[in-house]
Image (cartoon, helix red, strand yellow):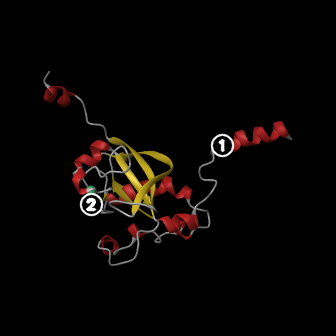
Amino acid sequence: MNFDRIESRFDLPRDIFVIAYNRRFIKKTEYIFSKYVPQLISNPLFFTLPLVPSGRRIYDEVWASAHVLLKPNSRFHRPMTRWWERKNWREFTQGSKGIFSPFVLKAVDKSGYVCSLCHWMKKCNGCIILPTDAPIFEEDLIKKCFIAIEWHSKILAENYNPVANEVVEHASTRKMANEVTD
Ligand SMILES: [Zn+2]
């Protein structure tokens, strides 16, 4: 079958479907390669992105869903408190300027633990997705559509909203339940 001919008859999708795993690093008591290992936490998030998103768009889209993990009074709900919103964000990626707060996005495979861009021999747990204004076209990233939301462990511990993983009830059903029990 001639794939090119089939492809030319269909439009490519305008949106891509992305799965984002919440992740943090924990310290291992016994280790061989690395003292810290990533650990998946909470539920994965699902959302759509344009086919060729800018890095910044990916961050903003993830934040729009992921912010619920933080307490309502967390300072990160205020604008310009997230590292990717800063003009000098590149300094963060060079390791010279503080930490990625509250999280950094990384390209991972479907396991959520392994980089989708590097060879496995490199033991990379995910290359950083840069919050560029220009569209990024990481072909592998777009094809695989998995992202790790790597929370800063200490920030998450201090700001975590314990009700974030409870089932979110719609106001109308909550009202009905109250009426039944009242
Ligand atoms: Zn990598």
Q: Is residue 3 left or right of residue 29?
A: left
- Using the image, determine if residue 78 lies above or below residue 117: below
In this rendered view, identify the residue nearer to me: 45 or 2: 45
- Using the image, determine if residue 2 lies above or below residue 85: above
Q: Residue at x 70, y 41 (%)?
A: 172
* Circle on res. 19: none
Q: Amino acid at mark 2?
A: Ala
Circle 1 SS class? loop
Q: Is residue 47 left or right of residue 163?
A: left
Q: Amino acid at mark 1?
A: His
Mark 1 C-beta closer than 8 Å to ligand 1: no
Provide the residue designation for mark 2.
134
Q: Residue at x 14, y 21 (%)?
A: 1
- Using the image, determine if residue 89 lies above or below residue 42: below
Quarter containing the C terminus: top right
Q: Residue 37 location, x and y as percent? A: 40, 58
Q: Residue at x 23, y 56 (%)?
A: 122
Quadrant containing ligand 1 reads bottom left
Res 5 → quadrant:
top left
Provide the residue designation for mark 1.
170
Is the residue marked by circle 1 packed among few (<14), some (14-19), or many (20+) residues within 10 Å?
Answer: few
Cα distance, mark 2 to mark 1?
A: 37 Å
Give yes or no for contact between labels 2 and 1 (Cβ–Cβ under 8 Å).
Answer: no
Answer yes or no: is residue 135 visible.
Answer: no
Res 179 → quadrant:
top right
